[in-house]
Image (tube, rainbow, N blue to C red):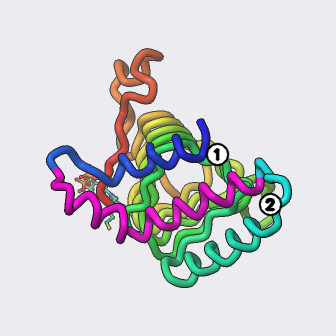
């Protein structure tokens, strides 16, 4: 999908059925998580498309906007990060993604989430599936894969792969809830909606 399609999907994550027009306008205009996502989508577009002539000016505009977001919202997502549509940042603040992180569609980031490399020698960065919920303070370190529909509990430290549909928690994170057998059937893939609230 293109930048605008992805961003439309991001915006939809912030809106609930039954919201008044006024609430929708306020949510879209004032949510810092959405500001951060908009700047990320713009930066990714500038750096991957590299538009001729205006490209350098857009890069400067992106760098200024991303620094402003880092200072005001405490969110840093690199333009190199490959993130699917429908990103929801419930509460910004202290969110940092390593430039090599990849993330699927409809994921949720809470405050103080870090997805990074190991400083101890293990190479690689996390790869996150679709519909993954990362609770407040979750840290995911190294080349680990988080399966579709997984939930990572608040303040967990994930250093090993997380099975699709499971809930992990603790330091280091251990599986707390495994998916029911039916939920692992191929037809059920991606049907496990992420928790929206941050
Ligand atoms: C993982 C989570 C989704 C599970 O929620 P739940 O299904 O309602 O589970 P419960 O709260 O009933 O807890 C189940 C067990 O896990 C434990 N537990 C819950 N969260 C935990 C955590 N983050 N770390 C360690 N243990 C935890 C509970 O103590 C309980 O243990 P017990 O069975 O021995 O009593 C939830 O605990 C969580 O971490 N959500 C993220 C919340 C968040 O970040 N919100 C952002 C607010 S801005």
Q: Residue at x 14, y 47 (%)?
A: 18
With respect to residue 184, does 119 lie above or below? below
The residue closer to the viewer here, 89 or 67, is 67
Q: Position of residue 162 (x, y in %)?
A: 53, 42
Specify whether residue 123 is painted magenta.
Answer: no
Residue drawn at point x = 60 percent, y = 55 percent:
41
User: Considering the image in quadrants, where does the C terminus appear?
Assistant: bottom left
- Give residue 127's mark: 1
Task: Name above or below for residue 98 compared with residue 108.
Answer: below
**Which quarter of the picture shows residue 100?**
bottom right
Whole-percent x, y for residue 7 in the image: 50, 49
Quadrant of residue 116 in the image? bottom right
In the rendered image, which residue does mark 2 sit on?
55
Q: Over which residues does the magenta segment extend?
A: 19-47
At 58% from the left and 58% from the top, the residue drawn is: 140
Q: Secondary structure at mark 1?
A: strand
């Amino acid at each position: 999908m293109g930048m605008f399609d992805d961003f439309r999907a991001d915006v939809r994550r912030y809106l609930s059925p039954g919201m008044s027009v006024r609430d929708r306008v306020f949510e879209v205009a004032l949510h810092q998580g959405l500001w951060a996502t908009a700047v990320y989508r713009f930066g990714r577009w500038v750096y991957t498309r590299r538009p001729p002539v205006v490209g350098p000016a857009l890069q400067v505009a992106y760098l200024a906007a991303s620094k402003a977001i880092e200072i005001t919202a405490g969110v840093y997502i690199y333009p190199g990060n490959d993130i699917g549509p429908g990103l929801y940042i419930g509460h910004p603040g202290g969110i940092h993604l390593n430039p090599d992180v990849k993330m699927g569609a409809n994921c949720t980031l809470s405050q103080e989430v870090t997805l990074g490399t190991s400083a101890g020698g293990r190479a690689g960065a996390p790869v996150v599936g679709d519909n993954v919920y990362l609770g407040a303070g979750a840290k995911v370190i190294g080349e680990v894969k988080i399966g579709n529909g997984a939930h990572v509990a608040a303040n967990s430290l994930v250093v090993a792969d997380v099975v699709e549909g499971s809930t992990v928690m603790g330091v280091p994170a251990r599986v707390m809830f495994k998916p029911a057998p039916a939920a692992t059937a191929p037809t059920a893939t991606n049907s496990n909606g992420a928790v929206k609230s941050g």
